[in-house]
Amino acid sequence: MTDPQYRKILLREIRKLRTLIQQRDDTELDISKTRQFVRATVNMLPDDERQKMEALLAYVDNSDNQNRAGLAEAIRGILERSPKRWFTVAQVRDALRDIGFDFSRYTSNPLSSVSTTLKRFKPPYIESTEIDEVTAYRWKAARKRKTETVAMSMDEIIDYFESKDSADEERTVERDEED
């Protein structure tokens, strides 16, 4: 490939990147406006419904925060999801890439960032061993995460509101038939 061809490809990709960044910024603004509307509107519900809806909102917010988590929290999530499995540093890095973790904020290469972070975890939470002369890690502390507690009841919350909507529709139909 010639220099002009590389420049042409790079310019095309830079334009694409600029467009994607603008779309991301627009989406983040939309998210912010929607979150603000939902928080304001949830207060209009009766107390029991408001609490359920706030739990659902907390689940969504926690999911969003996990996607934006720092390296240590992301690594913890990888290890906690498979507590019996041993991970090498390279496997943790690959798992992070698979979930879309953004390493661009880190000045060192991803492998060394992951390695350093793993070494900083305290022994009560993580254990290490040698497997084929390579250090492997796994999570050993059982920790009940807030998001797991909310996630378990998320389906119940959605079912509650769906059944409530159905009941409201049935009452409306009954009233219409009486009139």
Image: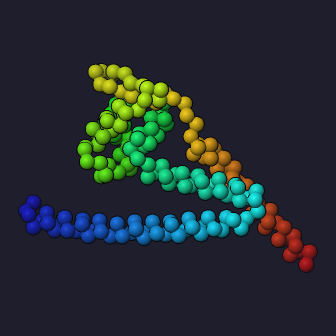
How far across and down, in percent of the image, does residue 98 sit? Answer: 38, 45
Which of the 4 image quadrants contains residue 113? top left
- The residue at the point 45 percent across, 51 percent down is 67
Looking at the image, residue 86 lies above or below residue 19: above
**What is the residue that sits farthest to the left in this orientation?**
2
- The residue at the point 58 percent across, 37 percent down is 144
Looking at the image, residue 149 lies above or below residue 67: above
Which of the 4 image quadrants contains residue 42? bottom right
Asked if residue 30 lies left or right of residue 16, the reply is: right
Looking at the image, residue 172 lies above or below residue 141: below
Q: Quadrant of the N terminus?
A: bottom left
Q: Nearer the viewer, residue 117 or 1?
A: 117
Q: Quadrant of the C terminus?
A: bottom right
Asked if residue 110 lies left or right of residue 30, the reply is: left
- The residue at the point 62 percent across, 43 percent down is 149
Asked if residue 3 lies left or right of residue 118, the reply is: left
Asked if residue 74 lies left or right of residue 56, the reply is: left
**What is the residue that sits farthest to the bottom in this orientation?**
179
How far across and down, in percent of the image, does residue 84 sit? Answer: 48, 27
Q: Nearer the viewer, residue 13 or 45?
A: 45
- The residue at the point 70 percent across, 55 percent down is 51
**What is the residue that sits farthest to the right in this orientation?**
178
Q: Is residue 161 visible?
A: no
How far across and down, in percent of the image, does residue 129 sit? Answer: 37, 22
Looking at the image, residue 77 lies above or below residue 69: above
Q: Is residue 104 visible?
A: yes
